[in-house]
């Protein structure tokens, strides 16, 4: 019986203990929050070494002054806060901002300035909501009532800016001269510090295979005469960052090309030509050159060469693609051209064809010219192969559609089912136009 009672009593005792703890915590929370005449009992928290942020440094510089960091300048403050425990326990040192404005100081020496305390939100900004929450916490003690600052007369020094290049350009590409938005930077600070600065340096890393122009905003670092980096300093630079550009260009050999306009009897495979120079070396942005392999100098109508004696010489200007540079320095190209095999022959034909569609309704026409001698040209083998049956003469009657009687009209000569030859000269035939007889 006793064992059964003990078994039943074990869970019950655990439940009673748990409820007692919950009730005790609730009572404690209520008394802590409302036991002080309806208000929470105050709690305190001390936060140490909160950095002091000094503003108005530009105004100091305009007056030829600067803030000197050292033993006489307050760099941090300890603050003790009092308020509801739930609020005080949530205070975060990183979100407490202590700032002092030096903009009204106009003379050097040791001086005291008031500082202000504000609370920032999670994003590091001083918002109304964060301020209202912080207003319910009182600042009851502090290590210093005001900030002490040492103000000194400012010294100015101008140093050169150097650029260190890291990385390489890709094969077939070339790097131009590094361009800096400014070549010097002015430093403002104590003579003792500035005397140690020899030059400023930025480092531009273009990667292992740069293929395009690289532009970056880079922060200056400062070095002494031994080329050692100065890491701990209190002087200021009038320009924190500069713009650095490394022009990267693609270099290519572009072939010089002339486009040939072919015609019957005048074909590209029957010419001999030479262009000097054959190519030019060009550099420029990859976007302007990646898909370019040649420069077209101009057009050459091969009919213009028919009948020419010897080699014909033409000169062309070399037009470089936009945004590119001619690395060869050559601005004009010369082409010598001639037909390898050009023959001429007169062929007599009696093949006349009337195009009735060129006549008015009710009109007919007949060619009175019995034969026509036609001059043909082209490669020797083609010219020799031309026969009378290959040549067709068609009178041009469009402008004489309403005429009657015998008229002399232009004629078009074409080659039908024959070799590749061209026709030289202009031709006319006599035609009789009359009313058709039904």
Image: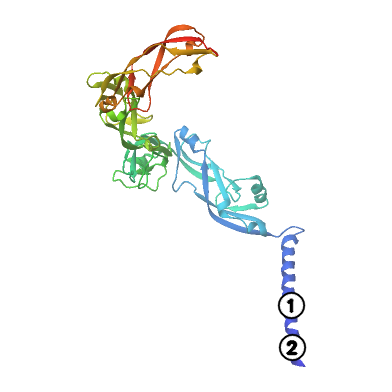
Residue 235 shows up from this direction: no
**Badge 2: residue crowd in 10 Å (few <14, some 14–19, many ≥20):** few
Say whether residue 150 is visible. Answer: yes
Q: Is residue 171 left or right of residue 20?
A: left
| Residue 87 placement (x, y as % from top left) | 66, 56
User: Distance between the Cα atoms at labels 1 and 2?
Assistant: 15 Å
Q: Name the quadrant of the C terminus.
A: top right
Q: Do the residues under discs 1 and 2 have CB atoms within 8 angstroms?
A: no
**Which quadrant, please, contains the N terminus?**
bottom right
Tag 2 secondary structure: helix
Asked which quadrant contains residue 377, the reply is top left
Q: Earlier in the sequence, mark 1 or mark 2?
A: 2
Question: For the view shown, which residue lies furthest in the top direction?
Answer: 405
Q: Which mark is residue 15?
A: 1
Farthest bottom residue in view: 1
| Above/below status of 94 relative to 16 | above
From the top left corner, tell me how far across and down residue 270 is, in percent. Answer: 28, 28
Q: Which residue position holds label 2?
A: 6
Q: How many marks?
A: 2
């Amino acid at each position: 019986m006793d064992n059964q009672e003990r078994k039943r009593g074990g869970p019950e005792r655990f439940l009673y203990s748990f409820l007692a703890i919950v009730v005790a915590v609730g009572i404690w929370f209520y008394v802590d929050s409302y036991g002080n005449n309806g208000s929470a009992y105050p709690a305190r928290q001390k936060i140490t070494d909160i950095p002091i942020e000094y503003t108005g440094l530009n105004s100091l510089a305009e007056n030829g002054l600067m803030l000197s960091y050292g033993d006489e300048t307050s760099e941090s403050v300890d603050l003790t806060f009092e308020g509801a425990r739930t609020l005080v326990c949530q205070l975060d040192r990183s979100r407490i901002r202590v700032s002092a404005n030096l903009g009204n100081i106009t003379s050097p020496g040791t001086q005291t300035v008031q500082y202000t305390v504000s609370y920032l939100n999670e994003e590091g900004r001083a918002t109304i909501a964060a301020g209202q929450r912080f207003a319910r916490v009182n600042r009851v003690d502090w290590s210093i009532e005001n900030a002490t600052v040492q103000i000194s007369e400012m010294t100015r020094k101008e140093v050169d800016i150097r650029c260190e290049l890291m990385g390489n350009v890709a094969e077939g590409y070339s790097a131009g001269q590094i361009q800096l938005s400014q070549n010097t930077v002015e430093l403002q600070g104590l003579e003792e510090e500035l005397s140690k600065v020899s030059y400023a340096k930025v480092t531009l890393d273009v990667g292992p295979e740069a293929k395009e122009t690289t532009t970056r905003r880079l922060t200056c670092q400062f070095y002494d005469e031994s080329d050692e980096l100065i890491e701990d300093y209190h002087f200021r630079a009038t320009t924190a960052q500069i713009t650095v550009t490394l022009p990267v260009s693609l270099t290519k050999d572009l072939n010089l090309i002339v486009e040939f306009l072919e015609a019957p009897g005048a074909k590209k495979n029957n010419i001999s030509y030479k262009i000097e120079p054959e190519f030019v070396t060009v550099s420029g942005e990859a976007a302007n050159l990646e898909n370019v392999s040649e420069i077209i100098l101009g057009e050459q109508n091969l009919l213009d060469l028919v009948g020419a004696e010897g080699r014909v010489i033409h000169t062309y200007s070399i037009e470089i693609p936009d945004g590119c540079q001619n690395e060869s320095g050559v601005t004009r190209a010369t082409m010598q051209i001639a037909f390898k095999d050009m023959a001429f022959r007169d062929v007599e034909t009696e093949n006349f064809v009337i195009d009735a569609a060129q006549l008015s309704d009710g009109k007919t026409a007949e060619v009175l010219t019995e034969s026509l001698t036609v001059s043909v040209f082209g490669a020797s083998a083609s010219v020799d192969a031309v026969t009378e049956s290959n040549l067709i003469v068609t009178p041009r009657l469009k402008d004489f559609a309403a005429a009657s009687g015998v008229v002399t009209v232009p004629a078009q000569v074409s080659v039908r089912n024959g070799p590749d030859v061209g026709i030289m000269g202009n031709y006319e035939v006599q035609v009789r136009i009359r009313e058709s007889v039904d």
